[in-house]
Every structure is written in structure tokens, then in C-alpha cells.
């Protein structure tokens, strides 16, 4: 990830941070995989695995935050090195929040599993958006590891597809709940699950934006959202 520096120890520090960050990303990926599988199977063991991973994730977040702070204090980096460390800190935060969303998914899944009667709701859009969110997170982590701005740009553009699946499911869910009032409680659980998946996609997009920030020195966090709003106004 980092360029070579005169200080070998600085290189070692950055390499270690990169390794730990990607390890954290791998843990979040496994959380999402298990959360989506639990949504399909209602397996209580998978639910517990996600919750246990979330506890480990919180510890990793605190450890990585401390490591980043220590590197900044010791090395007093400037320019791209400072941007890299700031971006790494933001990525840690986004990974922890993505893990929180996986926890929300299995919590709601557990509620649905214990409901007295499970309504017949087609959740195809949730499953599709779940796979899309997992894919975009993997790509975002790979883009961060390689500082690949072309891949990051594509991820940012692809985020709209997950949002579209979410909106399609919400429309279908609202219709279902209007026609089946007894299924409103479970319908709301599925709505929160769909929203959690959408937020995972948002956190992956934030990581991609961090890549652009490191390489180009440009903060684009709100640019593509404003572009969408302009396009919507003229469509």
C-alpha cells in the first residue's frame, strides 16, 4: 500500500497497519456472509457467530485507532502519508459500522425466526442487495490495499444499484403491509434489515472515497451525491 520511505521502521509501521486493517475487513466480510446466510436459514448458531465477531471487531477498532495515533505522533507524517493515515482511520470507523449493520441484520433475523407466524414476504431484493453489498465491500478493501483509484471510482458509481434494490423492496413491502396488517411487525423487521444492507454499501463506498482522497488529495465525499441529485432533477 505505502510507497517506500527512508525510514524502514516507518515502512514497517504502515505495512502493519495495512495488514491489520485488511484483517479487520476480512472479519467484517465473514460477518456479512454469515448474516446473509442466517437470513436464509434462520440458523441461531450463525446469529451467535455474527454477534461474537462484532465484539472482536470493537476490540480491533480500538487497537487500530491507537496504532494510527501512535504512528502519527512518532513519525509526524506530511502530505500523502498523513492523508493515508487519516484515510486508514476513516476506514476503520466504516468497517466497525458495517459490522454493526451485520449485527442489526441478525438481531432482526432472530426476531423474525421467533415470530408466532412468519408472513409470506418475497425478500428477493434483500438477498440481491446483500450479495451486492458484500461484493462492493470486498472490492473497496482491494482498492484500498492497492490504492486503485479506477476501481474506487467504479465502486462509487455502483453504489446506486444497491440503493435501487432497497427502494424496490421498500415499495413492495409497503404494499404488502397495507394488504396484510398482521404482518406489519415482521415487515418492519425486514425493512430494518434492508436498510442495514444499504448502509453496508454506503460504508464500502466511503472506503472507496478514502482511496481517492489519499491518491489525488481530493475530498469527494459529497460530490457524487450532489451529482445524483442534479441528475434526478433533470430526469
Image: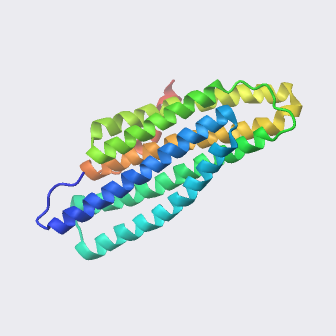
Q: Is residue 36 above or below residue 95?
A: above
Left-right relation of 35 to 152: right
The answer to which quarter of the image holds residue 191 is top right
Q: Residue 139 in the image: x percent, y percent?
A: 38, 38
The residue sitting at 26% across, 76% down in the picture is: 74
Q: On the picture, is 218 further left or further right than 57?
A: left
Q: Percent from the top left, x then y, of residue 48?
A: 64, 50
Estimate the x, y position of residue 81 in percent, counting from the top left: 24, 61
Colour scheme shown: rainbow
Residue at position x 81%, y 41% from top? 114
Nearer to the camera, 71 or 152:
71
Q: Residue drawn 31% across and 51% down? A: 213
Can residue 217 be seen here?
no
Q: Tell me if I can see residue 159 in this picture.
A: yes
Residue farthest front in this picture: 45
Closer to the camera, 212 or 71?
A: 71
Q: Could you say where residue 225 lies in the image, as x and y percent from the top left?
A: 47, 40
Is 2 located above or below residue 198 in the figure? below
In the displayed image of the protein, which residue is found farthest to the bottom? Answer: 74
Between 46 and 57, the one lying in front of the other is 46
Quarter of the image where one finds residue 105? top right
Q: Which residue is rendered at x = 26% and y = 44% of the image?
A: 146
Q: How many marks?
A: 0
Amino acid at each position: 500500500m505505502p510507497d517506500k520511505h527512508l525510514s524502514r521502521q516507518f515502512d514497517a509501521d504502515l505495512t502493519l497497519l495495512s495488514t491489520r486493517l485488511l484483517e479487520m475487513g476480512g472479519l467484517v466480510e465473514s460477518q456479512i456472509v454469515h448474516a446473509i446466510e442466517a437470513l436464509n436459514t434462520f440458523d441461531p448458531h450463525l446469529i451467535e457467530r455474527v454477534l461474537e465477531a462484532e465484539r472482536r471487531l470493537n476490540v480491533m477498532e480500538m487497537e487500530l485507532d491507537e496504532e494510527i495515533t501512535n504512528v502519527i505522533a512518532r513519525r509526524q507524517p506530511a502530505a500523502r502519508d498523513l492523508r493515508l493515515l487519516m484515510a486508514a482511520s476513516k476506514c476503520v470507523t466504516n468497517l466497525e459500522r458495517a459490522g454493526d449493520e451485520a449485527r442489526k441484520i441478525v438481531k432482526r433475523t432472530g426476531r423474525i425466526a421467533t415470530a408466532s407466524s412468519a408472513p409470506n414476504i418475497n425478500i428477493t431484493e434483500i438477498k440481491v442487495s446483500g450479495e451486492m453489498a458484500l461484493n462492493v465491500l470486498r472490492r473497496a478493501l482491494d482498492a484500498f490495499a492497492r490504492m486503485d483509484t479506477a476501481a474506487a471510482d467504479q465502486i462509487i458509481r455502483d453504489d446506486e444499484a444497491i440503493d435501487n434494490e432497497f427502494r424496490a423492496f421498500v415499495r413492495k413491502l409497503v404494499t404488502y403491509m397495507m394488504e396484510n396488517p398482521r404482518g406489519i411487525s415482521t415487515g418492519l423487521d425486514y425493512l430494518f434489515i434492508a436498510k442495514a444492507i444499504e448502509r453496508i454499501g454506503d460504508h464500502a463506498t466511503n472506503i472507496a472515497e478514502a482511496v481517492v482522497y489519499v491518491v489525488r488529495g481530493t475530498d469527494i465525499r459529497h460530490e457524487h451525491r450532489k451529482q445524483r441529485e442534479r441528475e434526478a432533477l433533470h430526469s
